[in-house]
Image (tube, grey):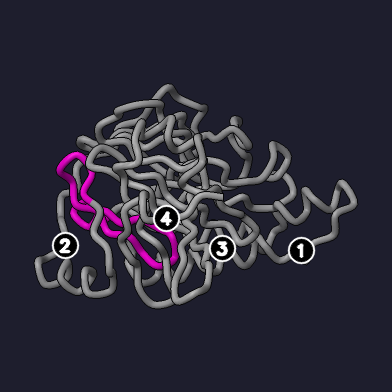
Amino acid sequence: MDARTSSLLDASRTCAPYACAPAADEKDKLRRRYESTITVDGTELLADLSGALLWPDEGLLVVADLHLEKGSAYAAFGVLLPPYDTASTLERLAWVIAYYNPRIVIALGDSVHDRKGWARLDEEDRAALASLQHGRDWVWVAGNHDPEPGRGVGGAFVQSVACGKLQFRHEPSAGRAAGEIAGHLHPSARISQRGRTLIRRCFASDSDRVILPAFGAYTGGLNIRDDAFLKVFRTLSFKAHLIGDRSIYLLPATRCLGG
């Protein structure tokens, strides 16, 4: 899989095995940065405070729902937002990539906010993307906002991609789906703490799958008590990994508030 050459949307892609997994002391270092380990179908993954997900054994970093160029999309309809969301999102992503130096990056769809978003990327943002992609494989998974490949943005464009026991796609399947890593729903959790109500982005997971929070600067969140999550997990037995300022906090979905 060569992320430097764009491809047409395939039905699926399979990633090559990682020939050189991180040493044990390096994995311990990574774990110390995290407060939450997520195990999906027997595979240990690590949740980052940024909202990214790391698979240390494969050197694989996953982000969901970047929604680049959302500000410019809204501006076209007369809703004026500061036009810095793309630069801000790419800057945060650059920090995460610089820290972990993954060999593969997978963006789980809705990487731009609308079908014309790729064309609106300015040269500076395109250069930033090229810099992030240098020396690693980069995979753009198709989403409902960006079903077609972008031009001049590097990477491989796919409908889904499999690696080992894990399957990476944009929209989570309804019901049990062992090994599924998805985005789309922008999970967030509402909790009551010391008389205050807090809303935080979160990872939503059970032993079969994980749904990532939206990574983009202008993305909102959908409460994990919404029916959309019940259709996916079937019950409220899943967990919320709440992203705090310095730690990730694990709570049962039943402990989180609706509304």
Amino acid type, label 2: Pro
Check residue 256 in the rendering and tell me which mark sits there, or answer none: 4
| Mark 2 crowdedness (10 Å alpha carbons): few <14, some 14-19, many ≥20 | some
* N-terminal-most mark, 4 or 2: 2
Q: Residue under label 3, please give it.
A: 90
SS state under label 3? helix
Q: Nearer the viewer, residue 131 or 65?
A: 65
243 versus 177 height, above or below: below
| Magenta span contains residue 70 | no
54 versus 34 height, above or below: above
* N-terminal-most mark, 1 or 4: 1
Q: Residue at x 66, y 45 (%)?
A: 113
7 versus 134 height, above or below: above
Check residue 165 in the rendering and tell me which mark sits there, or answer none: none
The Cα atoms of the two marked residues, 4 and 2, are separated by 36 Å
Q: Residue under label 1, please give it.
A: 83
Amino acid type, label 3: Leu
* N-terminal-most mark, 3 or 4: 3
| Mark 3 crowdedness (10 Å alpha carbons): few <14, some 14-19, many ≥20 | many
Q: Given this view, does label 3 or label 4 mark the residue nearer the observer?
A: 4
Q: Given this view, does label 2 or label 1 mark the residue nearer the observer?
A: 1
Look at the image and give the residue range highlighted in magenta: 39-59
* N-terminal-most mark, 2 or 1: 2
Residue 79 percent coordinates (x, y): 85, 54
